[in-house]
Structure formats: C-alpha cells, structure tokens
Image (cartoon, helix red, strand yellow):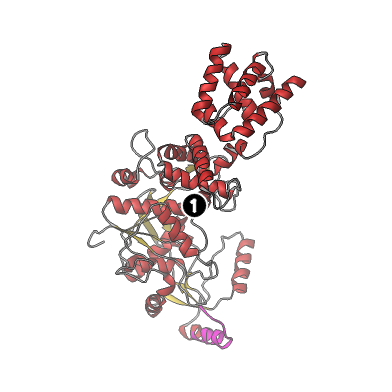
Amino acid sequence: MANNAIRVRYAPSPTGHLHIGNARTAIFNYLFARHNKGKFIIRIEDTDTKRNVADGEKSQLDNLKWLGLDWDEGPDVGGDYGPYRQSERKDIYTPLIQQLIDEGKAYESYRTEEQLTADRDAQKARGEMPHYEYEYEGMTEDQKAQAIADAKAKGLKPVIRFRVPKNHEYAWDDIVKGKVSFNSDTIGGDFVIRKRDGMPTYNFAVVCDDHLMKISHVFRGDDHVANTPKQLMIYEAFGWQAPRFGHMSLIISADTGKKLSKRDESVLQFIEQYRKLGYLPDAMFNFILLLGWSPVGEDEIFTKKEFIKMYDETRLSKSPAKFDSKKLEWINNQYVKEADNSTIMDLALRQLIAGGNIPENPDSKTIEWARQLIMLYKREMSYMAQINDMASVFFQEPEQIDGDALAEISNETAPVVLKEFLERIQKLDIFDSVEIFKVIKAIQKDTKIKGRQLWMPIRIAVTHEMHGPELPESVELVGKQKAIAHIKETLAQIDKA
C-alpha cells in the first residue's frame, strides 16, 4: 500500500457457528496486525443470502470475542471504511460493475442453468474439463445485441461475467507458499461477478472491499488459492494494486490424515462446542495458533501478550496442520491447573447443573460442597464437562465390587481395616477430611497395617473405585451416612465370599 500501513481483515460469512479453521484465520490476522501495530478489521460477507442463518453474525462475533479477539473496525464498532456488511455495500459495487461493462471487460450473460449443465455434460463426454463457453463467440456486435434483446424478451435475467484474458500468466509471491502462478486459460472461462439477484459474487466483492478498505495483507486458508488468479484479474482490470497474499496450510485430522471436514462428526470442529464443554478461551487460542504456526524453541504454552510479541508470519507452515484433540486436552489442562479457582468453580458448577447432578439453583451448602468437589478434581480435568464422569461416584450409588477391586479386598487385613474405620468414623462429631485423615493414621498406628493395604480397602469400600483424588477428601464428600452404608455393604460382601 502507498502508505505502508498494515491493515488486515477477517471476513466471515454468517452461515453458521465459528469453525476451527475460520477461527485460525482470524487469529493469524489478528496477531499479524497487533504485532505490527496495524489495524484488524471484521467484515461480514453476507451476499450469499440463501445460506445466511439467523443470528449467524452474532454467533461469529460472540465466539471471536470469547477467544479474546478485539477489532479496530467492524459492523459493531464502525470505522472510516464502512459499511462493514457486504449486503449494505451494493451501491458501491453497482457502478464498479458498470464500469467494467462499459470498458468491455464484463458483459451480460443469459445462459440458463439448464444450458450450462448441458454444456458441462457435453464437455465431460468429450473428456474436457468443464468450463464456460463464451456464448457470443463468432457473433458481430449487431448479432450480439440481437441475442441479448431476444433473451430479455423472454424475461431472462442475466448474470454479469468477467471477460478473462486469454493465455495470460497470473503470479504472486505467497507469504506462506512462495511463488505461485496460474495461466488464465486454466480457470474455467469467464466467471460470474454479479448473480441474477443483483448481488455481487465473492470474488468480485472481496476485491472491491479489500481495495476500498485499504487492506495490505490477506491471510486465508489454502482453499482460496484457486480464487486468487480471478481476483488478480479484477485488480488488474481496475488498475488497482493487489494486497500481499498468504495461504495457510490445510488442517487435517491427526487420526485419519484427511482434511478436516465439517461433515466429519467424529471431531468437534466448532468453537461453540468447546465453549459448551467448558474449555478455557486462552487455551483454545493457544491450541488453534499452533495449527500451522510454530514458535521458536520447544515451549508451546504462552500468554496472548507473548504471542503478539513473538508472532512471525514467516513461521507459518507449508505442511498440513494436524488437529489432535488429545493435544488440545493437554493444553487446556495446563491452563486449568493455572487458572483462578473462582473461574474453574464457575465453569464446572455449570457443568454439574447441566449434567443434572446439582439443582439449577443450589443453596449455599450445596455450592460449598460442589466447590470442594471441583477443587478435588481441578488438576485432573482437561475440560470442565469431565467433572460429571470423574465425580460420578458422588452422585450414583456404586455397583457391586468385582474384578481387581474385589481381589484387592480379599486379603485377611482388609476386613480388619474396614471394621476399625467403620467403628471410628461412626463416633466422629466433625466429619471432614482432617478428622478422617486422623482416623486413618490412628488405625495404622494401632494395627501396624500401612500403605496400600491400609488405604486401598477404604477407598474401594467407600467409593468402589481403585483410583481417585485424595482419600480423606473423597470420603468427606461421599458423606458420613453414605460412607457408613457403603462400608457395611462391602463387609457383608466379603463375608459371603
């Protein structure tokens, strides 16, 4: 750009929730702008009215904000280059399209969908790549005018097509991919720049918007590479300078090695889904950034401020980025461990309520009990929804002890430990982890039973689990009456064995 100002944009379509891949595009643009002290712009590309969904724009913006992104210009904050919704920019596009028509660089096309389909079928039958065939080929200007008049008389509505130059090379130095070039004869012929409903197509509108909004760099997914030559043609037709392009690598599934597809329901792919599971936004930001970009060194966990400082677009990878849900869980767990207890409490409490394990409007006693429970599992949780399964022993009556757990308590010292523990906790006036720990240590002193033979029978009897968080805290949360009942049931089962 003439003034060398850094201006980048993220331009979502309001056709659904924010996808992981689109979130990555937004984050890369955001970091590039913030690192270079430039401007980050949000522009809504909503010209495909048939695919737009109610609240689609709101969902996109809400989830971007949840990830921690802010923008300098956009539909909700305004700016000097608005409107920031393409549907509100029709008056800007119309004269520009007319300019191309007047200059012979675009024209009205009346080919119907049926005719276009027939053309493509015939081309396939001849072994050719499907392409648009110029409908006025070989006509004089008078014949062309007559053909257009006949089409109008039939009530046909035209699209506007861009006249693609013949055998012309379009090349650019891609920030990520390096040198890329296309011959104009390979892109499928003259392409539509305005649809029959009067709305511009993506490839036309995006060029006009990027130019008029003074966008300096465009970072987007690899799937847009094929659009770039078409857009360069439009820049050339207007005599405009194109921005620098950077096309980011595909995101593939770590399990299948295939491109992440929105139709693949085995992988959660929308930010909204991770929010509902209780993931932390800073962790999601961190994980998404590492999909196709790598910092210097071995460390992978950084704050957003650190990412802004270290961001370097030359470290964007040419190779496909692997979406590994296990790595996401690991990263989120690192953030959970360091997170403020009140944050974890709030998110996990919502999960317990959503799971039906705590009333919707819990009283103060229940909230305090839940707080202790959540803190017990804080370091183990990768995301908050796990609390319902991890802590299921506190909400469901345990099943009969069997397998390895039964074998563990089938030795001669287990009944001794359990009878002592039962007798002593029945006498406790204060049933908390401190007093329970004292009881366990007293049994060890009096019976000389220690280690696994001491702790494991108590854990199995009270929780019917062989593993779990701290034992005294677990027994406290099960509660005195349930703990007593569970131990009695276990002793009865041992006697029958």
Q: Quadrant of the C terminus?
A: top right
Query: Which residue in the rendered view is the most extreme toward the right?
Result: 496
| Tally of numbered tags | 1
The answer to whether residue 72 shows anywhere in this view is yes
Q: Is residue 279 left or right of residue 310?
A: right
Magenta stretch, main secondary structure class: helix
Report the magenta residues as a range: 145-158
User: Mark 1 = which residue?
Assistant: 271
Q: Quadrant of the N terminus?
A: bottom left
| Quadrant housing residue 468 | top right
Q: Nearer the viewer, residue 407 or 458?
A: 458
Residue 153 shown in magenta: yes
Q: Is residue 484 left or right of residue 50?
A: right
Residue at (73, 24) in percent of width and height: 492
Residue at (51, 72) in percent of width and height: 134
Q: Is residue 217 left or right of residue 407?
A: left
Q: Is residue 241 above or below residue 19?
A: below
Residue at (36, 65) in percent of width and height: 74
Q: Nearer the viewer, residue 292 or 118?
A: 292
Q: Position of residue 43 (x, y in %)?
A: 39, 64
